[in-house]
Image (cartoon, helix red, strand yellow):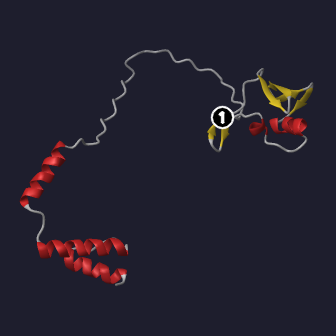
Amino acid sequence: MTPAALREKYAEVFGETSRSGHKEWLIKKIIWRMQANAEGDLSERAKRRALELANDADLRTKAPPEPKPASASKERTVTRKVEFSGDNRLPTPGTVITRDYKGRSIQVHVLRDGFEFEGEAYKTLSAVAKAVTGTHTNGFLFFRLGQYAGGVR
């Protein structure tokens, strides 16, 4: 049967239209209802037992959130300018990033506007990584900073 024909049969069996056009779902629902009509619905004993189980079952409910007090306390608010580096993976200026690479200890000083490695200034960590390895390498990955595909390292 086509989904359209199944929807017609559903309307005939249930007495209402179905919004679903999912063929397997319609077939299962129609067959279940036809069987229930032919052989009878659940016994009264089964219905009572189902209600007992439902009443005893732990319901997954969530308590409403606690309302926040409306300015009950007169706490002092302090505002100040906070500088944002633009990338939260970067350590603060003055930090030294250290990495062992092929038996050599690499130390990079984080500056306000870049990085310093072996007395030379670099704009990006990738430039430092290229100076160390000789090939283009992602600086954050090379120095193991920030997010990775597998999570934070």
Which residue is depicted at the point 66% across and 24% down?
A: 82
Where in the figure is residue 56, as x and y percent of width and height? 17, 42
Is 136 displayed left or right of 74 in the figure?
Answer: right
* Residue 108 occupies quadrant: top right
Q: Which residue is mark 1?
A: 153
Relative to 35, does residue 64 appear above or below in the rendering? Answer: above
Which residue is depicted at the point 14% across and 74% down?
A: 37
Relative to 41, does residue 83 appear above or below in the rendering? Answer: above
Q: Nearer the viewer, residue 91 or 113?
A: 91
Residue farthest along the right direction in this orientation? 119
Where in the figure is residue 36, as x and y percent of width and height? 16, 71
Mark 1 falls on what kind of element? Answer: loop
Is residue 83 in view from this perspective?
yes
Q: Give the quarter of the figure containing the C terminus.
A: top right
Relative to 91, does residue 54 appear above or below in the rendering? Answer: below
Which residue is depicted at the point 66% across and 39% down?
A: 147
